[in-house]
Amino acid sequence: MAVIGALGLASVALAAAPAFAKGHTDITAPSTAQVGKTFTVSALGDHDAALYVRACIENRSGTQAWHQVTCGDVVWTGTGSTVTAHVKAAHRGTQQYRTVVYGLSNPTDGHPVRLQTSDPVTVNIR
C-alpha cells in the first residue's frame, strides 16, 4: 500500500510541475561589409507559447536604441518564421543585428507579444 501511495504522490508532483514554452532564434550576417555595398541579414524564429509567430530583425549602431529593420510573415507555430533584410552599408562603423520573435493569437493580432530575442551579431563596416 505504501508503494501505491508513493507512486500516486510522485505522479501528482509531476503533474504540478510547470510546463516551459520552447522557442528558438537564429540570425546570420557577414562579419564585415564594405561602405556603399549591400549585404544580407537572415533570421528565423519560432516559439510554442503562441498560436502564431513572426520573426523580425532589429539593428543598432553603437549604444543607440534598437530599431526594427523588417519582419517576416506571420506563420503557425511550429512552421518557423523567416525574414531577410538587404542592408546598404552607408558609413563606416559597427552595426549589430538581432532576431526578435513575437507571438500572436491570430494572424491579424494588433498586439503581438515579444517572446524571445537572439544574441546580437556584429557587422564591421569598412
Image: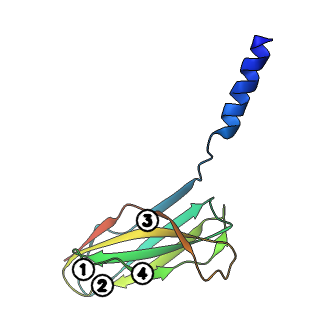
* Residue drawn at 67 percent across, 83 percent down: 108
Between discs 2 and 4, the one toward the N terminus: 2
Residue depth check, mark 4 versus mark 1: number of the one nearer the observer: 4
Q: Is residue 101 positioned above or below 35 on the image?
A: above
Residue depth check, mark 3 versus mark 2: number of the one nearer the observer: 3
- Look at label 4 and name its amino acid: Gln
Q: Identify the element where label 2 is drawn.
A: loop
Q: Is residue 9 positioned above or below 51 on the image?
A: above
Q: Quadrant of residue 13?
A: top right
Q: Which residue is mark 1?
A: 34
Q: Which residue is mark 4?
A: 68
Q: Residues within 10 Å of mark 4 (few under 14, many from 20)?
A: some
Estimate the spatial distance between the alpha carbons at disc 3 and disc 2, rounded to whole Å.
20 Å
Q: Residues within 10 Å of mark 3 (few under 14, many from 20)?
A: many
Q: Residues within 10 Å of mark 2 (few under 14, many from 20)?
A: few
Q: Which residue is mark 2?
A: 37
Between discs 4 and 3, the one toward the N terminus: 3
Q: Residues within 10 Å of mark 1 (few under 14, many from 20)?
A: some
Q: How many marks?
A: 4
Q: Nearer the viewer, residue 115 or 122?
A: 115
The image quadrant where one finds the C terminus is bottom left
Q: Identify the element where label 1 is drawn.
A: loop
Estimate the spatial distance between the alpha carbons at disc 4 and disc 1, rounded to whole Å.
22 Å
Estimate the spatial distance between the alpha carbons at disc 3 and disc 1, rounded to whole Å.
20 Å
Residue depth check, mark 4 versus mark 3: number of the one nearer the observer: 4
Find residue 52 and report its horizontal and vertical position in percent. Answer: 66, 70
Between discs 3 and 2, the one toward the N terminus: 3
Q: Identify the element where label 3 is drawn.
A: strand
Q: Which residue is mark 3?
A: 27
The image quadrant where one finds the N terminus is top right
Estimate the spatial distance between the alpha carbons at disc 4 and disc 3, rounded to whole Å.
14 Å
